Image (tube, helix red, strand yellow):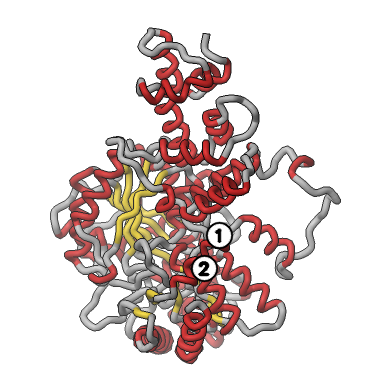
Amino acid sequence: MLHSACRRLLSTRGHYASRAFSAFQVGRIQTPTCAAFATQAEQAASPLVGVRKKLWEFYMSTGRGANALFEAIDLDENGSIDPNELKLFMKEVLKTSEGEEVDPKEIMPYAWKSLEQRAAAGESYDIKHFKNWLVAATKLSADMKNSRLLDYLNHHPNTGDQYSSGVEGEDHFTWNIETMSQSLRRMQYAVRGEVVMRADQLQAQGRNVLYTNIGNPHQVGQSPITYYRQVLALCDLPAEQGVDHPKVLEMFPKDVVERAREYRECIGPSGTGAYTHSQGILGFRKHVADFIQARDNYPSYPGNIFLTNGASSAIAMCLQGLLASNNCAVMIPIPQYPIYSALITKLNGRQVGYALDESLNWAVSREELDNKLEEAKSQGLDVRALAMINPGNPSGNVMTHADIQVITEFCAEHGIVLLADEVYQSNVYAEGAEFVSAKKVALDCNLRHLQLISFHSTSKGLIGECGRRGGYMELRHIDPYVQSQLYKLASSDLCSGVMGQIMTSLMVRPPASGDESYDLFQEENQRIFDGLKDRSQKLVDGLNKIPGITCVPAEGAMYAFPRVEIPQKAIEKAKDLGTTPDNLYALSLLEETGICVVPASGFGQAKGRVGFRTTFLHPDTLSAIDLFAKHHESFTKEYS
């Protein structure tokens, strides 16, 4: 008979455990004692190794199965794991399918350091501390610790008063740190991470903070565009106080009133306070389809358009439909916008990063895509989709037709769904650069069987109406049955916000030349565009003049993504603190200057690179260049 722990391990872990247990039953491997199990298993290619690896992969994709992992290591059933046992386990499960060893220090440097510290102290792991270590070991970066998030919520003045039960510790709650979704614990969103939380605390204490961490234009002083707000107001007001008021034409331009009446007709008699069709109001979807067709010179159909609460909710819908099993993966650019890594983690998927080449203006090669796909396949992953961001966030590059062709051909050849994030398509500043959609490139290249979903949003561009939560996605060559299920998913949320739907239609149907509002609209748009263009160029130029900081030109979007050279002592200090060098640098920058940026590690980057992302939205961004320079000099001296 197998020892009870070994039997339970092999018989209760699902399909792979069952297959492993069958190997014992048919006599292919002699039944060992539990104490000798690991050694004999290794010698005879025991199923235990395979079970452990599958349990690890299951946790990596789902955040579930921590208890099973614990038992897979704790074979003597004493309720604790020696750190050296955990080290051996990790080296075992991280081996490639060809048996090549992978250095855990490269995969999880900060979690591995804490493991070594625990081993040096002679402290073992119980199940609680093991789960905490797992979360740290499998997060994208060490920039954000959940304990700091809890402290932030407890002490930030904008959180508001909270009920207190008068008890502390998870033992008093059945839904607690151990029983909650571990995928949610592992999820990170760097744009509102630890640096931003500290910035909020400093601001609450009276410090002046320059927020350059997020693309939220109106928060940093960008004025709303008059035409949009006027139409929105007349759509929302009761008719007798708005479009049917006898003096409405004295208060609003004629074209605004006409557009509002047209939109009210599209919305129907229920008005803006009622639910709409779950895919969005048909008239507004027709406007989006007309915009896409005019932009790309290829047909677009309203039945393939979904109006959504910004691009983020549309991306989440698609990922939820794509990630069907524990080994389903999505290829994402490195660096990437953290919504992708956050959602993939939350939805129990796997990430496969493909590197953008900083030396080639953040382009990606076909060789890189092919290599990363083969690497993923060798790990047993099923790559379902690839995300591309154009113009780039955080990289600020604008992809050429040829750049996009590399990706569209790759996806078409391998049957990979392309998720084209195109929310910055109006933000192109570099001379000679222009936005080209993935759809246009695919059809120009006769890739008619490419499965493609494209996203756009009212939060970016020159509109910046982030709080409206307006956006759309267009489906191209997607299985009709899958589309019906995406509709079902949209139906579960009933519909996107009506004001966001109106905003989306306004984005794609601005006033026309000759309309009463046209001149003011053009003036306001041009002012915003010129300001962004001017700051994008001057910020990059200013950063590049600082010794130790280099930055690729920001051709589009709203961000610069500089590389920073820091002393080795700073890197070692970050390791000692259990954080990244980027986070150490960004927190230092905040404390010394009041400038709030996002550590580059939150977006992913090449090994050894240190940097940050900053927007150039705020009018004071350029005046902060001297502060960037002063801080970098003092930081370098401190750690030299």
Image quadrant where residue 170 sits: top right
Residue at point 41%, 71% (across, down): 507
Q: Residues within 10 Å of mark 1 (few under 14, many from 20)?
A: many
- Residue 144 makes an appearance in the image: yes
Residue at point 80%, 49% (across, down): 168
- Residue 264 makes an appearance in the image: no
Number of marks: 2
Image quadrant where residue 551 sits: bottom left
Q: Horizontal and vertical percent for residue 364?
A: 24, 61
Mark 1 or mark 2, earlier in chain: 1
Q: Is residue 31 left or right of residue 182?
A: left
Q: Separation of disc 1 and disc 2 at Cα?
A: 10 Å
Q: Horizontal and vertical percent for residue 363?
A: 24, 66
Tell me the SS state at disc 2: helix
Q: Which residue is mark 2?
A: 583
Q: Label 1 amino acid?
A: Gly
- The circle on residue 578 is 1
Residue at point 18%, 50% (across, down): 448
| Residue in front for this viewpoint, 237 or 564 | 564
Q: Is residue 356 above or below residue 553?
A: above
* Circle nearer the viewer, 1 or 2: 1
Q: Is residue 625 above or below residue 559?
A: below
Tell me the SS state at disc 1: loop
